[in-house]
Image (tube, rainbow, N blue to C red):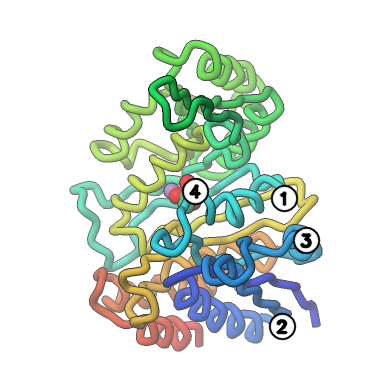
Amino acid sequence: MKTYKIALLPGDGIGRDVTEAAMAVLEKAAARNGFSLATTSYPWSCDYYLAHGSMMPGDGIETLRPFDAILLGAVGWPRKVPDSVSLHGLLLPIRKAFVQYANIRPHRLLPGVQGPLRSENFDILCIRENTEGEYSGAGGRVHQGTDSEVAVETSIFTRKGVERILRFGFEQARVRRGKLASVTKSNAQKYSMVFWDEITHRLSAEYPDVEVTSYHIDAMAARMVMAPESLDVVVASNLFGDILTDLGAAIQGGLGFAASANINPDRSAPSMFEPVHGSAPDIAHLGIANPIAAIWSGAMMLEHLGETAAAGEVMAAIEATTARGIGAIPGKDKTDAITASVLSALD
Ligand code: IPM
Ligand code: MN
């Protein structure tokens, strides 16, 4: 029987609640489809930090490297550890070290889910650059605490980094509805964003079957609200993609429905799958977190592993569940009830 090695990082807060739900569903889907998941769970989190002084051990990255995929719940508990420490100690280094340069986030309404918009027929795939740009971490502070204090944080855009994320976007558009929206702010940022636009234009010659349009980020934010059905694949830099995908989560009914995949397209290291929502400390371990985003992220993991049939079954089970009104209304159903419904819909 084919076995996939999965590293499970429940992380903090509701990350633990929703990954437990997701694993139950994924294991059942695996059993039904003749493969198995050999899962190893690591307790790396803010609690781990308080006990050990780091978010993961010094060899954490090397520990994860041999796995076929990583499923992550959420990282962060700002009252225990500042977010700037916890995120730079676990989530962000994994994305960079494993060259997970494409962060994929689907935004569409699941059946039975009421979004805040009049438009209900949108199906957007946001592709966020995930390793450089505004998240490069290049910068510093001097004269701290004095009147002369200076903080510098430089965005870094490389030809390699921009080209590969745009190519990824073109390829996705090609197998979807053939439309690519490339998002920048090149009217104001005349170096990096003009560079991005130029590469978009140059690559478009290689993808004559893809209709590409460049938008400024502010106009794209408005378009996602006013005319989301006009969009197919949306590709953006790290920070722009971060912001647009919270907007995407909002128009799909809330963060409880927003799935994501941090993909290493070259498969030179494991990819990582995680719901977009954070650790939500206020509702942690109350049994009320919506596991749909985590289960959907798990379906994306199965897809990435090549288990297309199982991934399809999990998506169908999610859709059958929300179509029956279960898990469809934020705050209404308990984590266990939603998970049980998805599990039974698998049969
Ligand atoms: C996300 C999150 C992270 C990000 C944070 C927690 C660092 O907001 O995955 O969208 O900005 O990438
Ligand atoms: Mn975000």
Q: Label 1 belongs to which residue?
A: 98
Q: What residue type is labelled 1?
A: Phe
Distance (Cα) linking label 3 and label 4? 21 Å
Q: Whole-percent x and y of residue 53?
A: 62, 63
Q: Whole-percent x and y of residue 286?
A: 34, 81
Q: Label 4 belongs to which residue?
A: 84
User: Contact, CB < 8 Å: mark 1 with mark 2?
Assistant: no
Q: Residue 59 carries which label?
A: 3
Q: Which of marks 1 and 3 is nearer the N terminus?
A: 3
Q: Which of marks 2 and 3 is nearer the N terminus?
A: 2
Check the image and report above or below for 39 versus 187.
below
Q: Which amino acid does label 3 sit on?
A: Asp
- Give the foreground label among 1 and 3: 3
Q: What residue type is labelled 4?
A: Ser
Q: Residue 34 carries which label?
A: 2
Q: Whole-percent x and y of residue 288?
A: 32, 78
Single out the residue that lies furthest toward the front: 146
Check the image and report above or below for 303 versus 105.
below
Q: Which mark is residue 186?
A: none
**Residue visible at 46% across and 74% down in the picture:** 18
Check the image and report above or below for 296 versus 191.
below
- Give the foreground label among 1 and 2: 1
User: Contact, CB < 8 Å: mark 2 with mark 4?
Assistant: no
Distance (Cα) linking label 1 and label 4? 20 Å
**Image quadrant where one finds the N terminus:** bottom right
Distance (Cα) linking label 1 and label 2? 28 Å
Lateral position of residue 335 relative to residue 58, left or right: left
